[in-house]
Each structure stands twice: as C-alpha cells, then as structure tokens.
Image: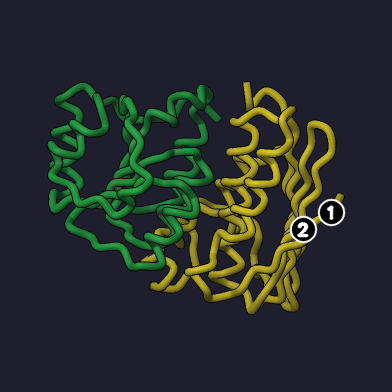
Amino acid sequence: MVKECQIIAGNFELAGRASSELKRFLKTQSHMPKSFISRVCSASYEAEINIVIHAVGGFMTYEAKDHEVKLYFYDDGPGIADIKQAMQRGYSTASPIAHMNGFGAGMGLDNIRRLSDQMIIESSPRGTRLTLIFKVGVKDE
Amino acid sequence: MKLTDLLSLCQTTAYTKELFEEKDIKFAFCSDLMSDALVIMNSVKDKKILEKTLLITGLATQQSIRTAEMLDVGVVLLVRGKIPSEKVIQLAYESNIQLYSTDLTMFNTSGMLYQLGIKGVKYDIQW
C-alpha cells in the first residue's frame, strides 16, 4: 500500500505533518519495533524539513511491507549542486529562518544517512528525488 | 525524580494543563538544534529511556514539539522564559506532549537537574 503526503515549502508551521502522519500509520503496524518506527520517522522528518527549507514544493510517499519501509521524497526545488559536499556535516545553504526553527546546521543529509539503511539521492536543477529504505535489523536491537 | 517535583523546582508555567500525567523523569537532553536531538536521542536503543526523558530547549516553535513526537519523548521544557504561540500549544495537545516553560537558563536548569541525579542522554552506539 502506497500513501502520499504533501509537503509545503517555506511553511514551518506545517513542517513535520507528513512525518507525523507516517508515525501514526507505523504505530498501527504492531510487528514493527518502537525503535525502528522512531528511526524511520526521525529520518523522514529531516527529509521533510529539507524540502520545506530548500524546495518550491514537494511530496512524500511511503510504503510499508513486512519488516521494511520505503520512503520517497520528491521536490521541485533547485536541486543539490554537489551531493558529496551537501553530505558533509556542517555544510549548509539554509536560510536564517531555518536556523530560527532549530534546523539548517548542515546535519540533515548526514543524519538521514545514519538513520536509514539505504539512501539514494538523484538531483537535477529541476528537482531532487530521495529514496530511503529501512529494514528492521541490527540498528533496532 | 517525579515530574511534579521537577516542575515546582524549576518554577515552570504549564501550557498543557489538561495533558498532565505524572512521570518518573530520569534523563534529559538539551539542545536548540533539533537535528542533534533527532540523531542523538535516536541512538538510544532502549526506548523506555526516552519515556523517562525531558527535552530541554529554547526553541519555542512547532519543531520542538514535532521532534519530541518523533522520538516518543512526552515532556518538553522551554527555557529562558520562552512563550509558545497558541498554534504551538495546540500542536502539543494534538501530539500529547506536555509543554512547560521556565525563566531559568538552559545551563542553570540542566545543572540543577544534574545535581539531583537526572542523567544526560548521550550516544548509545558508535556509528
């Protein structure tokens, strides 16, 4: 089952809404450990914040099957010019409004990489697609 | 430490009175950067620890509530006299997060709680 949530760029009041919805859904999956759900949703929240900060708009879709969750984030932002550089802790192009909201310190992408089991970024000047795969495993023991 | 005792010690203002639930607080984490809260608190393997954890922050926006929600931390304490907006309070109610505020600074709040035996959440695993 695939579900879709809209993410509105620049709107910090609603930022995190998609990840909240994901969390509520995953809580209904009784076979998934709490630590796994928390890991998935924290990564999702960071990715959602990235779209709020950098993109013009976007959406997330999520898919849960057995002991695996797949998240796809699509946005029509400016794209990431240098993915390797963007992955470095501390590198940030975020605006002061992101800092006022407790984000934008250049930790997001690296945190997502740490929290997920597989991370794929495809980016062009027309937008970015981020795929995250989570499997219940050693990170949740 | 009982949440009630902690709240009276820090002379807090309660913003979600109807949500009050007594808790045994044993751990705390403080940060204004939610990315750090997300990744460090996520490294805690035993999620029962986070149920006994207090998030101390100077960030009075929706993001501190969302962060607590993602981590299953039930209590947020705003420091330096931060006053949350109505929308933030409403989100705290929706997310079932107890929200308080104190005039104390982050350092003084943390120091006082540390002296009373509250432990800091730290990296539980090495990446």
Instruction: Note whether A70 is above or below A17 in the view shown.
Output: above
Q: How many C-alpha atoms fall within 10 Å of the one at disc 2: few (<14), some, or many (≥20)?
A: some
Quarter of the picture containing the N terminus of chain B is top left
Do the residues bearing badges 1 and 2 touch, measured as CB atoms within 8 Å? yes
Residue under the point 15% across and 49% down: B105
Where residue B99 sits: x, y (%)? 33, 50
Quarter of the picture containing the C terminus of chain B is top right
Residue under the point 66% across and 28% down: A33
Q: Nearer the viewer, residue A67 or A89?
A: A67
Q: Which residue is mark 1?
A: A2
Q: Is residue B45 left or right of residue B107?
A: right
Q: Is residue A65 left or right of residue A32?
A: right
Which of the 4 image quadrants contains residue A139? top right
Give the numbered dot on residue B57. none
Which of the 4 image quadrants contains residue A83? bottom right
Q: Secondary structure at mark 2?
A: strand
Where residue B38 sits: x, y (%)? 48, 44
Give the numbered dot on residue A61. 2
Q: Amino acid at mark 1?
A: Val
Q: CA distance from mark 1 to mark 2?
A: 7 Å
Chain painted in yellow in the figure: A
Chain assignment, label 1: A
Where residue A134 sits: x, y (%)? 73, 39
Chain B, hue in figure:
green
